[in-house]
Image (spheres, rainbow, N blue to C red):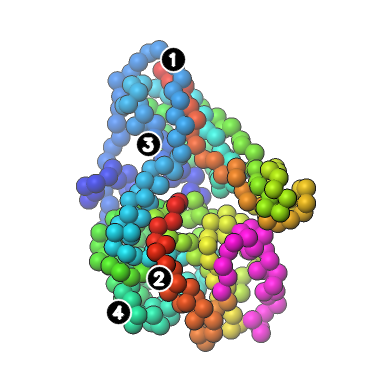
Amino acid sequence: MCTVCGCETGEMKIDGAQSRGHGHSHAPGFTQERMVQIETDILAKNNEYAAANREVFAGSNVLALNLVSSPGSGKTTLLTRTIEDIAGNTSLAVIEGDQQTTNDADRIRETGVQAVQINTGKGCHLDGHMVGHALEKLSIEDGILFIENVGNLVCPASFDLGEAHKVVILSVTEGEDKPIKYPDMFHASDVMLLTKTDLLPYLDFDVDLCLDYARRVNPNIEIFQVSPKTGEGMQNWYSWIASRQASNEIARSG
Amino acid sequence: MHELSICENIVSVIEEQAVEQSFGKVKTVRLEIGPLAGIELEALLFSFDVAAKGGVAENATLEVIEMPVIGLCISCSQSVEVKERYDPCPICGSFQVQITGGEELRIKELEVL
């Protein structure tokens, strides 16, 4: 149950436990009609939770990466390979977001790394509030937190979780025009991993066109071509992670 | 389809304001939404009625002020109006356009009783 905030979601579960909601407030009525200026960002509340998470990360020297992609891009496979390859160098933790099942967190735990599963119920994205609660169940300091978001290239773009960087994963079995079909996500991400490159010989995927589309939407995006299966290109991704961890760039303004 | 959670956020801001600014009923909610905010207006309008049920904003009208997409072209340094993130600069054709407006997702004001 929530002691620090007003939980309002009834569907969210963290490691199978239901979160409890509570009712809303009612104010005494005035009868006079008037205009109230609000000028409030609708996501302000989420941004507050994200800012609180960001403070936690900064305080414990944790590099938080928010992994986003469509379903089936191979996020979890990429993540388990990454974990196996870099676990010797630094301490790691994973937050898994899916509508249902704890399958992904189970897969991560098999690697020996601590993982928390968030089930969003009907929700299509993780938000700052859910991640804040998931953090209570993890103990990590001086390391890397991977947050694997719900497989969805639309909604997670709008919700800051307090991460240092969004990393968008696109597999070569998808269309090369995904970056312009779902521009918000590619715009919001600092890194794009083009994955499953070992399959390129069997596909008509135009890599150059895909990278061109990605840079149109986000001229500053860093791109790595990787294959978690063969390991090709993965070193570049690890070097990027290491460089981010080294530079003190934990907190990025949302 | 995150419009429902967006509406839950809107309703929660309104409920907080109802206590702070002492009003008991909302007639109109005026929002500023940019085309790049990732919001489908039809879905937003539909979700709002559901999210507002039983609270001070029940039966309130949702009005949306649509904002333009504005970008700053890095190549020619002009402020330009575009439609999408991947549009080239209409003046010089460069794709180095940094979006500066059009991502708004804001509650501007409320008409209350």
Q: CA distance from mark 4 to mark 1?
A: 61 Å
> Which residue, given by chain and number where applicable, does mark 3 sit on?
B12
Residue at 77 percent across and 54 percent down: it is B93
User: Residue farthest to the top?
Assistant: A32
> Mark 4, residues whose alpha carbon is within 10 Å: few (<14), some, or many (≥20)?
few
Q: Is residue A155 above or below residue A241?
A: above
Dot 2 and dot 1 residues touching (CB under 8 Å): no
Q: Which mark is residue A112?
A: 4
Residue A209 magenta: yes
Asked if badge 3 and badge 1 are on a common chain, one would say no
Asked if badge 4 and badge 3 are on a common chain, one would say no
Residue at 30 percent across and 35 percent down: it is A24
User: Residue farthest to the bottom?
Assistant: A230
The quarter of the displayed image where residue A94 is located: bottom left
* Marked residue chain, label 3: B
> Which residue, given by chain and number where applicable, does mark 1 sit on?
A33
Q: Nearer the viewer, residue A85 or B26?
A: A85
* Marked residue chain, label 4: A
Q: Amino acid at mark 3?
A: Ser
Sequence order check: which comes first, mark 2 or mark 1?
Answer: 1
The quarter of the displayed image where residue B57 is located: top left
* Marked residue chain, label 2: A
B107 left or right of B100 in image: left
Residue A109 position within the rendered picture, expressed as x and y whole percent measured from the top left: 31, 76
Sequence order check: which comes first, mark 4 or mark 1?
Answer: 1
Of circles 2 and 1, which is in front? 2
> Which residue, given by chain and number where applicable, does mark 2 sit on?
A246
Q: Amino acid at mark 4?
A: Gly
Q: CA distance from mark 3 to mark 1?
A: 21 Å
